[in-house]
Amino acid sequence: MIRIHETLIHSNIPITLGIIEAKVKVHESSSELKEALIKQEEALKASETIKHYEKPAIEGIKLLYRKFGKDPTRYRASSDSLFRRLVKNKGLYYVNNIVDLNNLISLKSYYPVGAYDQSHIAGDIYYALGTTDEIYEGIGRGVLNIENLPVLKDEIGPFGSSTSDSHRTMVTENTTQLMMVFYAIAYEDILNETLEETVRLLKQYAEGEEIKVSVIRSK
């Protein structure tokens, strides 16, 4: 179970984390999943909404970051970065079925979604502020300065955030036990339906079994 640290609770910004745990099989994405991503990309490009960056699920992350002095244009929410790739016509990339499924859900909901290999997580997990002496290597970002950045931490140290996840807990083809975290900051209006759709997609594209869904809130 993830606990929200008091430093974030005292921010008075409503924080909700959706959590999915599942037994999965990780492999190259099927043509069907890739096609679903392409269709979502095309639908967004055809929509007037792609011209506007103000998405509630992204704005909530920006609000939380600014509260603790982190520049949300330097530390963008992962969903914000993904959305901007489409705006700049850089196109999508394919990694594996879990990462691609994550991207599909983020493009539909705009929630940042972290995917973690539970076998590399130790002990209790807290969603808390990074401290001065804490860093981690973000996937595709190099060493990330996480001081005053809201991050997930276990007994070993920080391993994930709504900006970038760490190499330590990244999902690979050896991953069998998955944890997904949906960062719903000041906006949980569509969280339940997003979680429900993700469960369906895990069953469809990752042979998801023993799926557990939970939601925690700061207040």
Image (cartoon, rainbow, N blue to C red):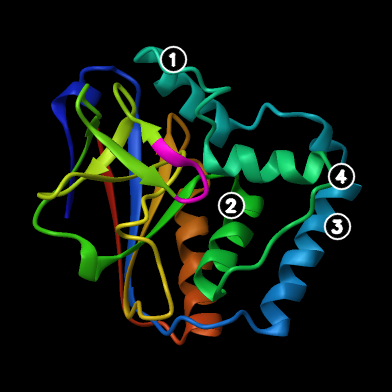
- Residue that label 4 marks: 47
x, y percent for residue 219: 23, 31
Q: Secondary structure at mark 1?
A: helix
Q: Which amino acid lies under the numbered mark 1 shown in the image of this protein?
A: Arg
Which of the two discs, 4 and 2, labels the residue nearer the N terminus? 4
- 25 displayed left or right of 155: right
Question: In terms of depth relative to the viewer, which is nearer, 94 or 41?
Answer: 94
Q: Residues within 10 Å of mark 1 (few under 14, many from 20)?
A: few
Q: Looking at the figure, which quarter contains the N terminus?
A: bottom left
Question: In terms of depth relative to the viewer, which is nearer, 219 or 128?
Answer: 128
Q: For marks 4 and 1, give the CA distance.
A: 29 Å
Q: What stretch of residues is rendered in magenta? A: 139-143
Question: Image point 81% across, 39% down: which residue?
Answer: 87
- Residue that label 3 marks: 42
- 174 displayed left or right of 196: left
- Residue that label 2 marks: 106
User: Which quadrant of the figure has residue 135?
Assistant: top left
Which of the two discs, 4 and 1, labels the residue nearer the N terminus? 4
**Number of marks:** 4
- Residue that label 1 marks: 66
x, y percent for residue 133: 19, 27
Vertical arrangement, residue 212 with respect to residue 136, above or below: below
Q: For marks 3 and 2, give the CA distance.
A: 15 Å
